[in-house]
Amino acid sequence: YRNAGSMPDRYEFSVGFKLPVYFRRKQRAAVAEQQLNLDRATHDLDAAGRTVQLQLTDAYLMAQTSRRLMRMYADTVIPQAKLTLESSLTAYQTGSVDFLNVLSNFMTAVEYEDNYQQEALGYQLALVQLEEITGSPITGLQEGS
């Protein structure tokens, strides 16, 4: 109902609705954008998984290598270097070897001990990396694993 003053009263009726003229075109673009976002997220997830796998493999191989080198130094290299040093000390006492040879053998034994300690450090660091990546404690790697 509308009162228009000096004009006669009248009734008005109106109906409104929206026509989705560009609805499909806009919806297709939004769907395509979301599909691209999903594809990108899937690729990012795959890349993250590969990165973690690479880090895990790298840390494991570092631990294995360091453990094997530690065993080699402890079982073979260091005992042989100590025997060589003892032999050169005995030879020095009898006068058949000069002091430089004894000093050289001593430095070699110390160097091998240092190398052993470096490998022990590398082994422990690799175990820490494995714990960090897996989120569980690692007590040590078994031979052949």
Image (cartoon, helix red, strand yellow):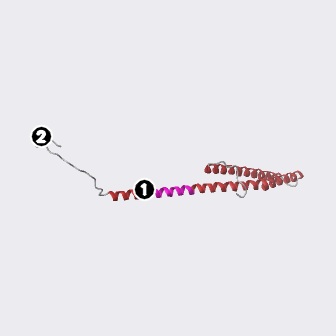
The residue depicted at 53 percent of the width and 57 percent of the height is 47
Quarter that holds the N terminus:
top left
Please identify the dominant SS of the magenta region: helix
Find residue 74 and report its horizontal and vertical position in percent.
77, 53
Classify mark 2: residues with Cα within 10 Å, few (<14), some (14-19) or many (20+): few
User: Amino acid under label 1?
Assistant: Gln
The number of callouts visible is 2
Per the image, is 111 magenta? Answer: no
Q: Mark 2: which secondary structure? A: loop
Q: Considering depth in this image, is 122 or 115 the residue closer to the camera?
A: 122
Discs 2/1, front: 2
Q: Which mark is residue 5?
A: 2
Per the image, is 40 magenta? Answer: yes
Find residue 38 and report its horizontal and vertical position in percent.
46, 56
- Magenta highlight range: 36-50
Q: CA distance from mark 2 to mark 1?
A: 56 Å
- Residue ID for mark 1: 34
User: Amino acid under label 2?
Assistant: Gly
Find residue 56 and report its horizontal and vertical position in percent.
62, 55
Classify mark 1: residues with Cα within 10 Å, few (<14), some (14-19) or many (20+): few
Q: Considering depth in this image, is 41 or 4 the residue closer to the camera?
A: 4
Q: Quadrant of residue 101?
A: bottom right
Quarter that holds the C terminus:
bottom right
Find residue 92 and report its horizontal and vertical position in percent.
86, 52
